[in-house]
Amino acid sequence: MVPHEDPVAADDLPPLESVRARIARTARIAGRKPAAIELIAISKTQPAEAIAPLIEAGHRSFGENRVQEAQAKWPALKAATPGLRLHHVGQLQSNKAEDAVRLFDVIHGVDRPSLVTALATAMDRTGHRPDCFIQVNIGEEAQKGGCAIGDLPTLLDTARAAGLPVIGLMAVPPADTEAAPYFALLAKLARDHGLAGLSMGMSGDFETAVMLGATHVRVGTALFGARAG
Ligand SMILES: *Cc1c(COP(=O)(O)O)cnc(C)c1O
């Protein structure tokens, strides 16, 4: 028996192994290599003690949504852990751009020209050039981060012209609705613009996202349990 091939056994595994097994199983069904999907453990609000067991289990990819919180938690962990990759997900204020490019290896929330300018300046000043995803407001929701679908071509041109290493598109589909059509639309937009990276899928829908081509899934509660507050 190979436990990772067995859907029932996967659910009895510790969370990290279970999520990895579910990604691997879905990738195989979709005819994809499991290694083509990066599992980002979203550790926002989680203390270092909750993160340590994942690092000990060999996990190296983590995500945070607040620069200040990440600055308090990660420099020590990064120094002690070779190969660690830190992702910034969600809204990024332009005045945090320089702190962000110093600490993070990947930035997923590039969604407006002013942030492109701030990141380009910060990259030139620091010499750190994290990979970037353009975030798209894929459900055209008011209040939601991400550029409008119609603004994507121009924002992408702006980001490329400014020298940002843009590797893909990122989105958070509308809550409480079937995510698959939004993932499919994001995948089409990425294809249309020659981008290989697709940052999509969270705890409730990462298997759907993998089925539809996600290269990066951002998983918090399925790994750490519910966040306080
Ligand atoms: C918090 C967060 C996640 C993780 O969400 P879970 O539902 O806990 O898996 C993913 N992406 C972004 C942008 C987030 O802010």
Image: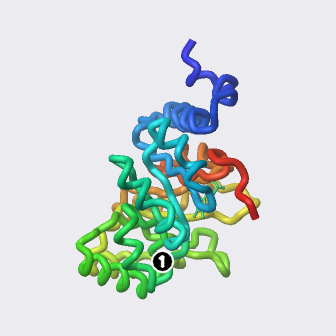
Task: Name the spot of residue 67 as percent of width and height, x first.
Answer: 49, 72
Q: For numbered disc 1, what is the local secondary structure? A: loop
Left-right relation of 133 to 5: left
Disc 1: CA contacts within 10 A as few (<14), some (14-19) or many (>=20): many
Q: Which residue is pictured at 50% across the width and 66% down the height?
A: 72
Judge by depth and name the residue closer to the eye, 4 or 73: 73
Q: Is residue 58 above or below residue 139?
A: above
**Residue 179 visible in image:** yes
Q: Which residue is pictured at 58% across the width and 49% down the height?
A: 49
Write down the quadrant of residue 207 in the picture: top right
Judge by depth and name the residue closer to the eye, 72 or 197: 72
Q: Which residue is mark 1?
A: 111
Q: Which residue is pictured at 35% across the width and 70% down the height?
A: 102
Judge by depth and name the residue closer to the eye, 48 or 157: 48
Quarter holding the C terminus is: bottom right
Write down the quadrant of residue 121 in the picture: bottom left
Quarter holding the N terminus is: top right
Task: Name the spot of residue 12 as percent of width and height, x first.
Answer: 69, 27
Left-right relation of 90 to 221: left
Ligand 1 picture quarter: bottom right
Judge by depth and name the residue closer to the eye, 13 or 110: 13
**Residue 32 visible in image:** no
Q: Which residue is pictured at 76% across the width and 60% down the height?
A: 176
Disc 1 marks which amino acid?
A: Asp
Q: Is residue 94 above or below residue 184?
A: below
